[in-house]
Image: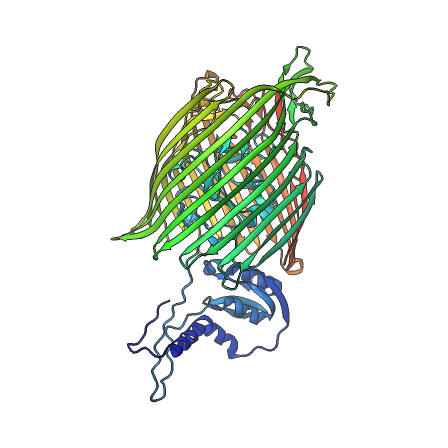
Amino acid sequence: MSVRRSSAPPPLARTARALCLGLAFAALGPAAGALAAEPAPPEARADYDIPAGPLNRVLAQFAAQAGVPLSFDPATLDGLRSPGLRGRFGMREGFARLLAGSGHALVDKGSRSYSLGRVAAPAAVTPPPSPAGTAQLPEVRVNADPAPPTLADDTGFVARRSAMGTKTDTALVETPQAISVISRQEMDARGVQTVTEALRYVPGVAIETYGPDSKGYDWLMIRGFNGQATSDYRDGLRQASYSYALFRTEPYGMERIEVLRGPSSVLYGQAEAGGLVSRTSKRPTGTRLREVEAGAGTHEVKQGAFDIGDVAGEDGRVAWRLTGFARDGNNVFDDRNDRAYLAGAVRWKLSGDTEITFLADYLRDRSTLTNNWSWTWPGPVPTHISYSERGFDRFHQNQGSVGWELEHRIGEQWRLRQNARVGDVDVPVFNKTMLNGLRADGRTLNRYAFRREENLRQVAIDNQLAGRVALGDTVHELLLGLDLSRVKAHAQRWIGAEPTLDLLAPVYGQAFALPATAQLDSRVAQYQSGIYLQDQVRFGERWLATLGGRWDRARTTTDNRLNGQRQAQRDQAFSGRAALSYGFASGLVPYASYATSFLPLIGTNTATGAAFEPTRGKQFELGLKYQPPGSDSLYTAALFDLRKTNAATTDGLTGFTRQVGETRSRGLELEAKTSPARRWNLVFNYTYNDVEVTRSDVKSELGRRPALVPRHIASVWSDYRFDGALAGFGVGAGLRYVGKTYGDAANQIAVGGRTLLDLALYYELPHWRFALNVSNALDKRYLSTCASSACYWGAERSALLSARYSF
C-alpha cells in the first residue's frame, strides 16, 4: 500500500477517517457497487460454517453448500486467503463477504450459473472539495495487489511450493531437484495410516521391502538405496537412529510429507545419497479448528483422533493447536499394534518482526510378534508356518520431543531463523525369536532368542540467515547456515537358547529361560557441525542458477562395555550443488544439476569389526517440470546417474550390516499430479531404476542388482467428488505395480512383481465426513521378499471405516 500526502497535513482525526474510507472503497469498490446497483430480491438464507483457508478452496466449498454452479480458474486466486464464513447468509451476501478485497466479483451468467470477474481497484480516492475555511483532505492512493503465494497457502491436493529443496519458500516448478509432496488432503483421500502408505504413490521409492513391520519401521529404498534409518527428517531436522532405536511417525499429526530425491548434503549435512523423506508437523492455523474422528476396521482395529486449535486473546498474537490419536487393534498379520500419540504447538507473535512456534509430541507404541511373521521356507514353496513365539516376541517403544522455530525479520529483505529440537527414543522391551538353521531331517528348525534394551537422545539446531540482494541485472536469494547435532545412544543385547520347532507339527509356547548371555553392550556418541551457503541467482529474463557449498565435521566414539575397548573416528567433507534452470512462459522449466552427499554412519561393520566408513554420493540429474499457467497441475520428469560408495547393507534375517564398495544407480522418474476438472484429482508415477554393484570385495555381487530394489515401479490414483443429485459423494481408486526384485546380493532368489488395488468411498456434509478406505482390495497374496531360509509376506487386505466431525 502506498500513500501520497499533501504538504499541509490535516488534523489526525480527518486523516484517519479519510484513510478508512479509502480502504473501504478499495476493498469493496466496484464489486460492492455492482451488487448494490440493482438490489436483488430477498433470497433464502442458510447457516454456513466454512473454515479459513485459500480463497479458491473456500469459494468452492461455499458454492457447493449453497448449491450454486460456480466456474472460475483457481490459479487466478493463488496467494489469496479467506477467513472463512460462519453464520447465516444469503447466496449473494455470502459471495460478497468472501470476495471483499480480492479484486474479483460474482458474475451472473444466467440460468443460475455464475463465474468470477476481475474488478480494478480505484486508482485514487479524492474527497470532494471542502467547504471554505476547512482544511483540504489529502489524496489517498491504495494499491490492493494480493500478497505473493507462500508455503502457508499451499494446502490443496496439488502442491505448488516447498521449502525442502532449498530451505527457502520456493515454487516446486523452480526447484532444480526431483521433489514429491503428499498433502494432508491427499493423505485423507487415501486413508493413510502409516508413512509407508503415504509413499505408495511416489516415484523412485520402493516401500514395504520386508512387508508390514509390527515395529512400525519405515522400510524403504530411494533410488535404490536403503533410506529406512538415514533419510528420516521432520520439520527440517534429521531424526537420528542407532541400532533399533529409531524415531517413528504418526501421520495424523503431519500436515504434509515430502520426498526429496538425490543427494542433499549441501543443505542437510548428514544426508542419504538416494534422498530424504521429510515430515511436516501440524501447526497453529490462526483460526478456530475443531475436529474429532472415530474409526473401526479389519483386524479388530478401533481408533480415535482429535485436532483442535484457536487463537488465544483478542489481539491474535498467540495461536495454539492440540492433536491426539489412539489405536487399539492388530496389524494385517494379527500382530498387536497399539498406539497413543499427543502433540501440541503454540505460535507466539512477539512483535511485528519476530515470531516463535513451540512444538512438542509424545508417542507410545506396543506391538507383538516382532518377527513380522517371517515365514520359513524349507522347500521351493514358502509355507505359512511362523517360527515366532507369541508369548515372547514383543516390542515396546516410547519417544518424545520438544523444540521451536524462531524467525526474526531484519528490514524488508532479510530473515534470521532458528530451528531446534531435543528428541528421545526409549526401547525398554525388544524380544525376538531368531532362526538358527534347519536340521538334516528337513523338518526340525533350530531357534535362538535375543532381547534388547536401547535408548537414544538427539539435540539438533539449525541457524539460518536468509535475504535478497539485487546486484546489477541479477537478484540473489542468499542463505547462510550453521547447524549442530549431538547424538548419544546405548544398546544392550542378550541371547539364549530356545526350543526347536517341528515344521510339520509345530508346537508353540514351550518353556525357555529369558536370554541372559550378554552379546552387546555399547555406548555411542556423535557430534556433528556444518556450515553452508546457498545462492539462488536470477538473471536474464527467466534464468535461475542454484549454487551451494557446505563443510561438515563429525566425531564419533563407540565404547564397547563388554571388552573395555573404544573406537574413535573423525570425518570431514565438502559437499556441493550446482544447478541451472530456465522458465519458459508456457510453464515449462528444464534444469540440470550436479550434487554430492556425505553421511557418517553410527555403528560397527559386522564383517570387519571396525567403525563404519562415511558414505559418499555424487549425482548428475537432468529434469523437466511443467506447470501450465492457470492450471492446478504439475508434471515432472527426471533422468539421473547416481553413484554411492560405502553403501551399508543389512541382512534382514540376522540384522548384521556391512559396507559395499560402490553402487551405481541410473534411472528415469515420471510424475503427474493434476486436478484436470473440478472435484477430480489424479496422480500418476513411473520409475525405471537400473541399479548395479560396481565395486565390492564379494565377487558374487559384482555386476548384480542389490537386494530389494525393483527395476520398475508404477502407480496411478484418481478420486472424484460428484455433483448434482450425488453431491457429497466421492470415490477413489488406485493401482500400484512393483516389479521383480531379488532377495539376495548374488541375485539367486527372485521374487515376482505384484499389482495391487486400493479403493476409497466417502460422503461429505457441511460438518461430517464418512469414509471407507480399502487397501489391497482384491486380497492378493504376495511375497515382499525372500532370503535363503525365510520369506516375508506382503500386506493382505485391510479396510477402515471412519467418521469425522468438524465444528
- Looking at the image, which residue is at 57% across and 43% down? 251
Q: Residue furthest left?
A: 472
27 is higher (above) or lower (below) than 535: below
Q: Residue furthest bottom?
A: 132
The answer to whether any part of residue 742 appears in the image is no
Q: Is residue 471 left or right of residue 212?
A: left
Report x, y in % for residue 571.
37, 28
Which of the image's four quarters has the N terminus? Answer: bottom left
Frontmost residue, 26 versus 775: 26
Frontmost residue, 222 versus 726: 222
Report x, y in % for residue 443.
69, 15
> Total marks drawn?
0
- Looking at the image, which residue is at 45% across and 67% down? 103
Frontmost residue, 243 versus 375: 243
318 is higher (above) or lower (below) than 602: below
Frontmost residue, 802 versus 744: 802
400 is higher (above) or lower (below) than 704: below
Quadrant of the rendered image containing residue 92: bottom right
What sort of colour scheme is used for the picture? rainbow
Q: Is residue 459 left or right of residue 369?
A: left
The answer to whether any part of residue 469 appears in the image is yes
Quadrant of the rendered image containing residue 617: top left
Which of the image's four quarters has the C terminus? Answer: bottom right
Q: Residue furthest top?
A: 440
Report x, y in % for residue 750.
57, 24
Report x, y in % for residue 306.
62, 50
